Image (cartoon, grey):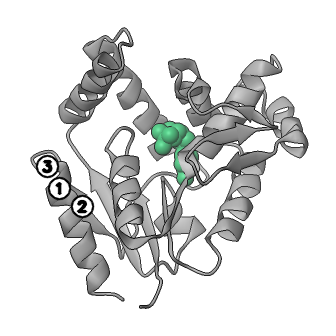
Amino acid sequence: MKKISIAIDGPAAAGKSTIAKLVARNLNYTYIDTGAMYRCVAYCALKNHVNFDDETGVSALLKNIDIRMLPDGTIHLNQEDVTSLIRENEVSMGASLVSKYQAVREFLVDKQREMAQGGGVILDGRDIGTVVLKDAELKIYQIASIECRAMRRHKENMERGIASDLEAIKAEIALRDEQDMTRKISPLKKADDAIEIDTSDMTLDEVVAHVMNLVAQRV
Ligand code: C5P
């Protein structure tokens, strides 16, 4: 069967990675979480006491950044397992701030294209269908209402035993979306040829089935 490339873009906490992982497992495809790569750059800035607003400082870090996404799903930055560290709130906001810099985007987009070579991949992020994989055979723009996205994240936090404030989550998501949609380079937007899926009133199984159906029409 033909191995295609799948792009999933959309706003923060829309469940893109959950869907991408399940679809990748069904198809035996490689899943690439591009948001995790921006998070690694932000984490590296934090660790080296470089301010997120310091474009020159953040850009200078790139030459010493080695990001590895291992088959077991863990993410290593310069040989440190940062899988859970990059999920901290401070890193989420930092990722959104450093992702507006041209040097950061060029560095990571090159890596993402290299990793996606040959097809049989699902990438999720903000600019996959518009920039990274413009020729992807299937492009999805996954959205959900802000209430729904914040509530899902809140429940996830509570299940993991992490202190969680629904209104704070809503504000953080809204701010990150605003930054991601209004930045000059590669802002978040739906590619002209992307299929929009509003998951607000859909179950996980329904979304996965829908995506699998779209894949079946293309292989
Ligand atoms: O997807 P996730 O929420 O982990 O991404 C963290 C941040 O990284 C986003 O808010 C966005 O600013 C940035 N990002 C990006 N382009 C991508 C993926 C993520 O700018 N392809």
Do the residues under discs 2 and 1 have CB atoms within 8 angstroms? yes
* Quadrant that contains the C terminus: bottom left
The kind of residue on which mark 1 rests is: Asp
Q: Secondary structure at mark 3?
A: loop
Task: Write the residue at 78% across / 49% down.
Answer: 103
Find the residue positioned furthest to the front.
72
Q: Is residue 45 above or below residue 31?
A: above
The kind of residue on which mark 3 rests is: Thr
Residue 208 is labelled as 2
Nearer-the-camera pick, 148 or 117 = 117
Dot 1: within a 10 Å radius of its alpha carbon, few (fewer than 14), some, or many (20 or more) residues? few
Q: Is residue 129 above or below residue 59?
A: below
Do the residues under discs 3 and 1 have CB atoms within 8 angstroms? yes
Q: Is residue 211 above or below residue 206?
A: below
The image position of residue 85, as x and y in percent, is 60, 24
The kind of residue on which mark 2 rests is: Val
Nearer-the-camera pick, 31 or 26 = 26
What whole-number distance in Å separates the C-alpha atoms at marks 3 and 1? 5 Å
Residue at numbered disc 1 = 205
Residue at numbered disc 3 = 203
* Quadrant that contains the N terminus: bottom left
For residue 80, which quarter of the picture? top right
Is residue 51 among the parts visible in the rendering? no
